[in-house]
Image: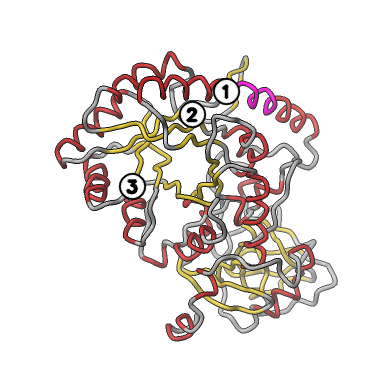
Amino acid sequence: MRDESSQQSQPVAVTAAPQPAATRPAATRDYDYYRRAFAGHALPFAWLDLDVLDENVRAVLGRAGSKYVRVASKSVRSVAVVRRILAASPILRGLMCFTAREAVWLTGQGFDDLLLGYPVWHPDDLTAVARATADGAHITLMVDSVAHVEQVESVANLVGVRLPLCLEVDMSLAVPGLHFGVWRSPIQNSELAHPVLERIAGSKHVFLDGLMGYEAQVAGVGDNYPGQRAKNALVRQLKGRSVRLDAGRRASVVALAESLCGPLRFVNGGGTGSLATTRAESAVTEITVGSGFYSPGLFDNYRDFRFQPAAGYAIEIVRIPAPGIYTCLGGGYSASGGAGKDRLPAVYLPAGAHLDPLEGAGEVQTPIHYRGPERLGLGDPVLMRHAKAGELCERFTQLVCVQNGAIVDEVTTYRGDGQCFL
């Protein structure tokens, strides 16, 4: 790892705004490019290609149209990288956080306009948010029930502040025998939203700041998996139906919310996988995006768009047990979610390499099968991609940043800053 003086000598490498298109496009970056760039660096490590990150930021902005983009911190998990992304454009505005403690900590790092993507219940966490609010922070709490509102209200009253709330509306699609979506809010329509909105409107200690509807089944479900034509067709059909229903549902709840609570500061929707459809809704003012910036493995399986792999991790070849098999140290970093092959890490480079079907990616060793043109030897890196975005940063304290063929910086992840929120 680089010493402190080395990191301080190039302080703008990551925190600066994204630059014009890279001198070598992401599509032409091969194994040799990264092997040369990372030569001599101790393995394993997580890497971030700043040129490719910048390409993805520009692609996100292009797909967002006229909507603001809120950055999902859970998919980035590095303060320096979040700053770089936000610096790219005034269209990128605010963060969606995943815990109260994370949001409060981020206010101490200079961030504002923080939206909690999930409800907060514990009084200690709510008190921390309330105290940060008293000190000038703007942290919006997520609610989907009268009980949530009353819990927040009680703490706000004790601390002597008025706390902003965001009402989450369920965007899932119910079809016979299938819940197409995720289990989040119980509020599925205006009728169910009405008592919660009335409770907010009648409170002196909370107010309605915004509304969110996350169409996870559109934004986070791939529809172009190899060898799954029938399933892909079904998912696309269900997505199309969801998009039509979600727009009407969101608009009706927004109208009710504004009639009871006054104008909303924001209406949030979507995600990386639904930019093109969510931006078409007139009621939506902003779209949350996270995974698109790093573009992990799960986002290879969409028909309508493709971002470039900007982040991953490198593991070291330490054994060659047989011709065409290269055993690396470590590497078993699986993703959360429903257990399946798509949650496993995948070999990125050298192209054509793959995991052993019996061993997979292991806790202490990962055998790689490869019979391509690259000459691999002991000490060489194998580049891997995590299935999801921010979870990669929970395994490493730093991101090794490469730009134009060379390491230009090393920046801390949340873990490197001594933080572990979930």
Q: Total of numbered circles in the picture?
A: 3
Specify the amino acid type for callout 3. His
Viewer-side residue, 305 vs 302 = 305
Q: Is residue 170 above or below residue 106?
A: above
Q: Which residue is mark 1?
A: 179
Magenta: main secondary structure: helix
- Foreground pick, 315 / 133: 133
What colouring style does the render use?
Answer: secondary structure
Mark 2 vs mark 3: which is more N-terminal?
Answer: 3
Residue position marked by numbered label 2 in the rendering: 183
In the picture, residue 243 is in which quadrant? top right
Q: Are marks 1 and 2 in contact (CB under 8 Å)?
A: yes
Corner quadrant of residue 192: top left
Give coordinates of residue 114: x percent, y percent.
39, 48
* Residue pointed to by mark 3: 138
Residue at left offset 27%, top offset 51%: 136
Q: CA distance from mark 2 to mark 3?
A: 27 Å
Q: Please tell me which residue is depicted at 51% across the width and 75% down the height of the picture.
A: 12
Question: Is residue 7 left or right of 60 when viewed as pictured?
Answer: left
Please name the residue shown 57% across and 75% down the image.
Answer: 43
Q: Secondary structure at mark 3?
A: loop
Report the mark closest to the observer, 1 or 3. 3
Circle 2: residue type: Trp
Name the image quarter holding residue 333. bottom right
What is the number of the mark on residue 233?
none
Q: What residue sits 65% from the left and 79% below the top?
A: 406
Q: Give the magenta part as a residue range.
A: 238-246
Residue 400 forms part of the magenta stretch? no
Q: Position of residue 58 (x, y in %)?
A: 65, 56
